[in-house]
Image (cartoon, grey):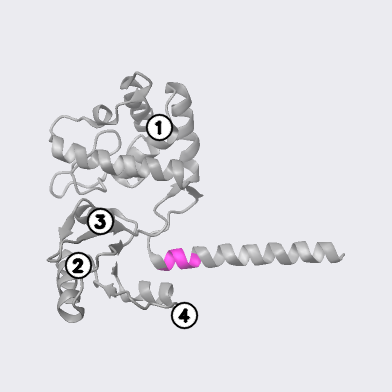
Amino acid sequence: MKFREKQSDFITKTHNQNIKDRRLISMSGLKPKTVMQMIQHTYVSRGSYPTEGVFLGVDNDVAGHKFVDRFKNMVLDTKDGQQITFHNLIPNDLQIPKKHIPLYQDAAIKYNVNWKDIVAIHKAETNLSDTNEIANNFGYGKYFGKSLEVNEQPKQINLLSAIDNCARGLAEHFKSGRFNLMKTLDAPGINSIEINKMHKKVKAYSEKYNDLGFLPTNDITKDWNDKLKLDKNMRDKKISNKKELAAAIVR
């Protein structure tokens, strides 16, 4: 079962694809009730639950990340003893702004830490933003973000200083050859349950950056239509390069 914010996101992604044995649902926004209702509707109308996973393909923005966080740690038990799990399908979620990478790397060298761990914390706190608006559903902000008051507007942060503080925080909790991420994330005013959720999110991004890689980019892709354009440009560039190579060989 796959959810998107708007119908056009499905049209661009599923054109000419075989969509048998799956349900594609447009929420017309971000609607948690729609997710739960459609899970129940699947059982009533089809006699089965989406036990192969519910995938949330919402936009790569503050609201989208908060929406995914509401479900990410949730596991639903079905009547027949199976489980329904929720998965992040945000488009190009591993993109990193090119201009920020040298800043992460310099701080990592300075404090002898892994620069991708700094990125993971920045990602989990504010979605790699250069403002202090929190992009998680736990109200967590320590190095990059801040829990804003009602009607308080996000403010620009000193990104270089924030990255330096984060790298120092990682280095300060290095013991017996290992970094203690929980202590690095420990912050006053935030309870242990929320810190534990944040720990899982940071760890998941860190593992993805280290295992799956990352995509340096000039502009972060926000939705599936933007992703389609980016993918098309990359395909066109590859085709153009192959043609140029073939022409050079002929000459």
- The crowd level at tag 2 (other Cα within 10 Å; few <14, some 14-19, many 20+) is many
Distance between mark 3 and mark 4 Cα atoms: 28 Å
Q: The disc labelled 1 sits on which kind of residue?
A: Leu
Q: Are marks 3 and 4 in contact (CB under 8 Å)?
A: no
Left or right for 5, reference 92: left
Residue type marked 4: Asn
Which of marks 3 and 2 precedes in the sequence? 2
Q: Residue at x 15, y 61 (%)?
A: 81
Q: Position of residue 147 (x, y in %)?
A: 18, 41
Which contiguous range is marked in magenta?
Answer: 225-229
Front position in the image: 124 or 226: 124
Q: Nearer the viewer, mark 1 or mark 2?
A: 2
Q: Which secondary structure lies at badge 2?
A: helix
Q: Which mark is residue 68?
A: 3
Q: Which residue is mark 4?
A: 16
Please name the residue that numbered disc 2 is placed on. 35
First in sequence: mark 3 vs mark 1: 3
Closer to the chain start, of discs 2 and 4, is 4
For marks 1 and 4, the one nearer the N-term is: 4
**Above or below for 102 versus 131:** above
- The mark that comes first in sequence, 1 or 2, is 2
Is 226 part of what is drawn in magenta? yes
At 18% across and 77% down in the image, what residue appears? 47
Which residue carries the number 1 mark? Answer: 160
Amino acid at dot 2: Val
What secondary structure is found at the residue carrying circle 4?
A: loop
- Residue 54 horizontal/vertical position (percent): 27, 64
Crowding near the residue tagged with mark 3, few <14, some 14–19, many ≥20 C-alpha atoms within 10 Å? many
Numbered mark located on residue 28 in the image? none
